[in-house]
Image (cartoon, rainbow, N blue to C red):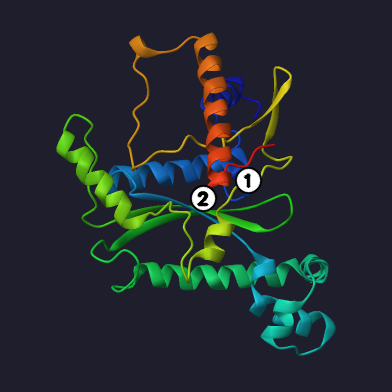
Amino acid sequence: MLNRDYVNGLIHNDDAFTFLRCDRSSPAFWELKKKEVMAMIRQLGCPTLFLTLSAAETKWSELIVILTQVLENKVITLEEAENMSYEKKCDLIRNDPVTCVRYFEHRLKYLWEILSAPCGPFQGYELVDKYVRTEFQVRGSPHVHALLWLKNALKYDKEKPESIERCTEFIDKLISVSSKPTKFSEELINLQRHKHSHTCKKYVTDCIKCRFGIPYFPMRKTMILEPFSDDEKLTKKEREEISKNRQNVIKELDKISKDQDNSLTFEEF
């Protein structure tokens, strides 16, 4: 460290923090993980799917049964767990975050087995590899982001109209955005609805907006949207005008959907 050139080399090459590579959440740790992702992309190509998973502890009756047994030394049935008050469930979850995380990890392990199974949801497209990042939200619950690579997945080529058509068909085969509930999907649809909270609100020019841009403008079919080219870029005033018109259209659609008892709803602040 007494050699000035050596110290300058550490600073210039950003090597002074490499000893922190094993320290989770350090810049050096995430630099290493970023290189791992980039290496996978070079070897496997562009990921097929991006997956986000959040823990729904209050909805997992099996977890509530386990927490009651661990914390209160009491055995309850699944029906009793389902009928337990929301406040009581939250109290159990707060008092044993370790068991909650282990249970989430257990469910995640079996989810990967289901997705990898020949009879799983990716029939015809084998799950080749995945990259998983687990983080913890402010409330202490685990949250997962994952990149998935599927075998024989279609490659998007914006220059070929037939590629665009095949890719939209591929998307519709794996992903659904229908809000019409079925016997099995009603509860799942409710979990996918965005509800504005303090985490998504941002204050812009005397108004409140959702930082995710929700509600999204509705479309009749799946479309792959390309970013504007340099010649098509809009001015700030034009973007604000489009955003204002978009909000007005969504409000009108919301009124129509309510009048017609449509299942589509557009939540506003």
Task: Please tell me the numbered disc located at residue 25.
Answer: 1
Which residue appears at 58% of the width and 46% of the height? 258
Which residue appears at 20% of the width and 45% of the height? 166
Vertical arrangement, residue 67 with respect to residue 17, above or below: below
The amino acid pointed to by label 2 is Asn
Disc 1 vs disc 2: Cβ atoms closer than 8 Å? no
Q: Is residue 243 left or right of residue 103?
A: left
In the rendered picture of this protein, how many numbered marks are placed on residues? 2
Density class for disc 2 (Cα within 10 Å; few <14, some 14-19, many ≥20) is: few
Which secondary structure lies at badge 2?
A: loop
Residue 148: which quarter of the image?
bottom left
Q: Which residue is mark 2?
A: 262
Image coordinates of residue 116 in percent, x first then y, are 35, 68
Work out whether mark 1 precedes mark 2 in sequence or the reverse, and give the earlier one.
1
Residue 159 seen in the current view: yes
What quarter of the picture does the C terminus occupy?
top right
The residue sitting at the front extreme is 259
Which secondary structure lies at badge 1?
A: loop
Vertical arrangement, residue 237 with respect to residue 118, above or below: above
Density class for disc 1 (Cα within 10 Å; few <14, some 14-19, many ≥20) is: few
Residue 56: which quarter of the image?
bottom right
